[in-house]
C-alpha cells in the first residue's frame, strides 16, 4: 500500500486515494460511471437498510417505476425539464446490427419518440398517480423507491457526483398544502436523524434559496454537512412541489362534497453521496474512520502467531470471535498470511472501529488488546471484560459525532460586513452566517466574487433594522454561505 496524501496538502487527492486503498469503488469503463466494490457497497447497504426502516415506519410503501421515461412526460412540466435538460441521457434507437466486424445502430429501429433515462422519477410517477387518484379516499399516497438514476455530469467524482448513482426517491400525493408541507418537513427530520445518530455527522437544516431549489419545486428543504476541508455537502433534500406536477398530468380528486380539487406533491431523496460524506467528515491522514453503527466490520481480530504456530492461540482467537458474534457484533478474524503490521494498516485504512490484537502473551494471560480507530488508543482487558467492547463501540460512535460537531462549531462564523464574508470564505472557509435581502443579484455577486453560495436559509425572523451583508438593503433572511461540493 502506498502512503496516502495528507489532507492538508491536497484534500481532493487524499479523498481519491482513500477510496482506492480502502477498496470502496473505482471508475467504470464509461466516463463518469462508478463501480462500487463489495466493501463500499456494504457501507451503502447498511445505510439503505437503516433509512428504509424509518421510511417504512413513517407510513411509506416501497415500489418500483421504469428506468425509461417518454420525452413528452418531461415536457409537461416546464421548470422541471429546464432544470434537467442538459443532464439527460437520450435513447433514440432500439437495436444494433453487425456490419462485418463492427456493431452499428440500425437506422430502421429509430424510436417514434425519444426515451429519457430517468434523471429523477416525478414525471413517470405522476403519470401513474393519475390512474390511482380519483377520490379523497385515495389520498395520501406515500411511495418510495430504491433505484439508480442517470445525470450526464461533465465533472465527476466518485460517490459525490457520478453520471449514474444509487439513491432512494420518495414521492407523495396529498389533499392539501398543509399536509404536503408537513410531509416535506418530516422527511428532513428523518434525514437529520440518519446523519446525526447513525452516521455521526452533524448537519445544518434549512431551506434553499430560489436559485438553489430543485427544478419544479416551490420549496426545497435541505440538510448541509461540513466536510473536513470546511466545504459544505448537500447531504439530502426534501421538496414541496405544490400542485405543479398534479396539474401537468391532470391529476385531481373528488373531495367529500364531490368537488374537484388539485393534488399537492412532495419528492425527496438521498444517494450514494452519503458514502462520500462519511469519508470526508470523519476520515483522517490514515484513511477511513467509520462510526460503528454503519461499519461493515465493527471489530477485526488480528492473531499474531509465532513462527511455528500455536493451537492454543488459534483456539483462543476462535473463542473471542464466537463471543463477539454472540454479542451481535459484526466481527471478523484476519486469517491472511500477511504480516501483523500489514494487517494493522489494512484495517486502519478501512476504518474498522476496533482492532483486537491477540498473541501468545494475550492467550496465556487470558487477555485481549484493543485498539480504537478513532483515537488509536490501545488498552488491554481480560477476556471476562469482553462485554466492554460494545460499550467502547458506543463511545466511538458518540466521539466521532462530538468531534465533527466541534469542528462544525469552530468553523462557523457570523459575518456583519461584506469584507468579513469574503475574508472568511477566501482565507478560512467554513460556514458563514449572514443577513441577506433575498435578491438573486446579491446572491450571484457572492458566488462571482468568492465562489460561495447560499447553502440554506436558516430563518426569516430578523430584527427590523437588519441589513443585507451584500447590498446593505433591508434583510429578509438569515442564511449560510459556503463553498460546496
Image: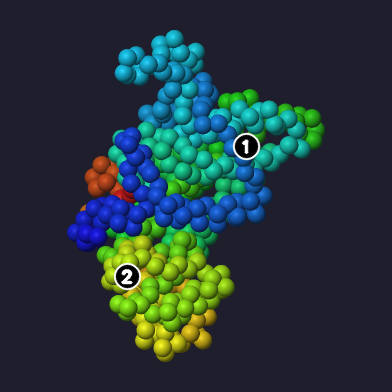
User: Is residue 357 or residue 403 the one in the foreground?
Assistant: 357
Q: Tell which residue pokes out farthest to the left in this image.
A: 9
The residue under label 1 is 264
Asked if residue 412 can be seen in this view, the reply is no
- Count neighbours of disc 1 (C-alpha within 10 A) and say few if under 14, some if 14 to 19, many if 20 or more: many
Give how far across and how far down residue 58 sits, in percent.
Answer: 64, 53
For the point 43% across and 35% down, the residue is 150
Residue 211, image quadrant = top left
Q: Is residue 321 above or below residue 413?
A: below
Give how far across and how far down residue 130 sits, in percent.
Answer: 66, 28
**Which callout, 1 or 2, points to the residue nearer the camera?**
2
Answer yes or no: do the residues labelled 1 and 2 have beta carbons within 8 Å?
Answer: no
- The disc label shown at residue 177, or none: none
Question: Is 398 left or right of 408, judged from the image as shown?
Answer: right
- The disc label shown at residue 344, or none: 2
Q: Is residue 373 above or below residue 267?
A: below
Give how far across and how far down residue 426 sits, in percent.
Answer: 22, 54
Amino acid at each position: 500500500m502506498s502512503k496516502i496524501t495528507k489532507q492538508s496538502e491536497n484534500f481532493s487527492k487524499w479523498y481519491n486515494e482513500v477510496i482506492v486503498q480502502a477498496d470502496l469503488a473505482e471508475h467504470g469503463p464509461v466516463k463518469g460511471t462508478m463501480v462500487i466494490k463489495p466493501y463500499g457497497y456494504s457501507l451503502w447497504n447498511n445505510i439503505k437498510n437503516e433509512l428504509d426502516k424509518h421510511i417504512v415506519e413513517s407510513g411509506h410503501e416501497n415500489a418500483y417505476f421504469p428506468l425509461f421515461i417518454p420525452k413528452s412526460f418531461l415536457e409537461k412540466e416546464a421548470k422541471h425539464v429546464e432544470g434537467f435538460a442538459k443532464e439527460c441521457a437520450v435513447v433514440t434507437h432500439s437495436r444494433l446490427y453487425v456490419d462485418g466486424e463492427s456493431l452499428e445502430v440500425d437506422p430502421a429501429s429509430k424510436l417514434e419518440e425519444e426515451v429519457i433515462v430517468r434523471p429523477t422519477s416525478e414525471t413517470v410517477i405522476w403519470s401513474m398517480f393519475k390512474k390511482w387518484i380519483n377520490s379523497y379516499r385515495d389520498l395520501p399516497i406515500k411511495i418510495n423507491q430504491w433505484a439508480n438514476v442517470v445525470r450526464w455530469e461533465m465533472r465527476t467524482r466518485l460517490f459525490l457526483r457520478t453520471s449514474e448513482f444509487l439513491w432512494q426517491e420518495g414521492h407523495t400525493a396529498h389533499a392539501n398544502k398543509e399536509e404536503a408541507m408537513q410531509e416535506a418537513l418530516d422527511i428532513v427530520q428523518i434525514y437529520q436523524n440518519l446523519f446525526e445518530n447513525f452516521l455521526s455527522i452533524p448537519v445544518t437544516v434549512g431551506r434553499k434559496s430560489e436559485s438553489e431549489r430543485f427544478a419544479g419545486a416551490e420549496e426545497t428543504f435541505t440538510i448541509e454537512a461540513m466536510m473536513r476541508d470546511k466545504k459544505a455537502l448537500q447531504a439530502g433534500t426534501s421538496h414541496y412541489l405544490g400542485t405543479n406536477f398534479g396539474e401537468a398530468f391532470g391529476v385531481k380528486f373528488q373531495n367529500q362534497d364531490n368537488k374537484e380539487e388539485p393534488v399537492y406533491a412532495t419528492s425527496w431523496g438521498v444517494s450514494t453521496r452519503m458514502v462520500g460524506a462519511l469519508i470526508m467528515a470523519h476520515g483522517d491522514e490514515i484513511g477511513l474512520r467509520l462510526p460503528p453503527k454503519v461499519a461493515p466490520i465493527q471489530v477485526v481480530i488480528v492473531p499474531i502467531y509465532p513462527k511455528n504456530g500455536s493451537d492454543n492461540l488459534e483456539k483462543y482467537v476462535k473463542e473471542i470471535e464466537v463471543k463477539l458474534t454472540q454479542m451481535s457484533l459484526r466481527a471478523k478474524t484476519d486469517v491472511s498470511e500477511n504480516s501483523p503490521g500489514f494487517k494493522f494498516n489494512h484495517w486502519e485504512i478501512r476504518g474498522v472501529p476496533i482492532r483486537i490484537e491477540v498473541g501468545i502473551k494475550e492467550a496465556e494471560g487470558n487477555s485481549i488488546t484493543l485498539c480504537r480507530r478513532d483515537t488509536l488508543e490501545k488498552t488491554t482487558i481480560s477476556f471476562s471484560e469482553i462485554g466492554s467492547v460494545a460499550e467502547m463501540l458506543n463511545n466511538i460512535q458518540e466521539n466521532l459525532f462530538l468531534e465533527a460537531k466541534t469542528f462544525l462549531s469552530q468553523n462557523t462564523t457570523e459575518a456583519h460586513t461584506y469584507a468579513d464574508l469574503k475574508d472568511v470564505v477566501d482565507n478560512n472557509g467554513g460556514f458563514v452566517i449572514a443577513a441577506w435581502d433575498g435578491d438573486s443579484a446579491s446572491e450571484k455577486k457572492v458566488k462571482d466574487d468568492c465562489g460561495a453560495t447560499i447553502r440554506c436559509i436558516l430563518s426569516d425572523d430578523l430584527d427590523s433594522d437588519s441589513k443585507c451583508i451584500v447590498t446593505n438593503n433591508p434583510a429578509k433572511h438569515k442564511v449560510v454561505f459556503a463553498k460546496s461540493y
